[in-house]
Image (tube, rainbow, N blue to C red):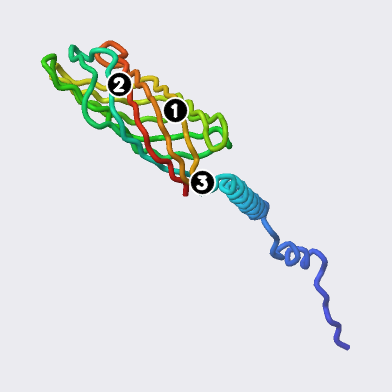
Amino acid sequence: MLFQRHPSPAAVAPAISCAPRSAPGARRRRAALAAGLTALALGGASLGAQASMFSADQAYAGGNLGAPHYADSVNGVSGDGQGLVGKLYGGYQLLPSVAVEAGIARLGHIDNTSGTLHSRATYVDAVGALPLYGSWSLLGRAGLAHVGLDTSNGNDSGNGLKLGLGAQYDFKRQVALRGEWERYLPDTFGAHPAIDQFSVGVKVGF
């Protein structure tokens, strides 16, 4: 009679121990990948929610034209100011009565016996509106400007405070007429000369 030999438990143990198993490093990599994908999804959702807070119909642009007035002499050049001044700007209505605006401006020139002066500026303002009667609103602004001054006695540029007051009349929701006074106070030539701009213009919403 033939007897079939069965392997001993000791011989089977190595075969069982060789069965494929997930290494701890692989499990950690999978967990890290899952956590990264979750964070990415949450971050995308957060950015989408923030983007939805900003609406294109709250943005607007505009332009003004007017006249300059130099209240102080600038680097030895004095005079009331000449030429057509103007500005172009873009803005965003953060709240019904609060907006932020950024723009560029030409501030006129002086050309007389004291010398010549040409000026320009870029600025960022916070703008507040106080509703008055009907379609009228009172405007107030404060911000920072960078002003460049080219004079016959030398050139300089600097930053400074910018202030303004004005009135706005809304023809309809997206179109308004503005009349404004704005003052630039740049730190130039060791002083803060006051440069005024009186202008009227149109604001148009998108």
Residue 147 visible here: yes
- Compared to residue 67, the image places residue 78 above or below, namely above
Check disc 2 and report its element: helix, strand or loop: strand
Which residue of the protein is positioned furthest toward the bottom in this rendering? 1
Q: Residue at x 28, y 21 (%)?
A: 69
Which residue is label 3 attached to? 172
Placement of the N terminus among the 4 image quadrants: bottom right
Residue 77 as seen in the image, left or right of residue 10: left
Amino acid type of the residue tagged 1 in the rendering: Gly
Q: Estimate the x, y position of residue 55 in percent, counting from the top left.
A: 54, 48
Q: Earlier in the sequence, mark 2 or mark 1?
A: 2
Q: Earlier in the sequence, mark 1 or mark 3?
A: 1
The image's mark for residue 180 is: none
In this view of the protein, which residue sits in the foreground, 76 or 131?
Answer: 131
Q: Looking at the image, is mark 2 or mark 1 nearer the viewer?
A: 1
Q: Earlier in the sequence, mark 2 or mark 3?
A: 2
Which residue of the protein is positioned furthest toward the left in this rendering? 113
Which residue is label 1 attached to? 166
Residue 76 as seen in the image, left or right of residue 55: left
In the picture, residue 9 is in which quadrant?
A: bottom right
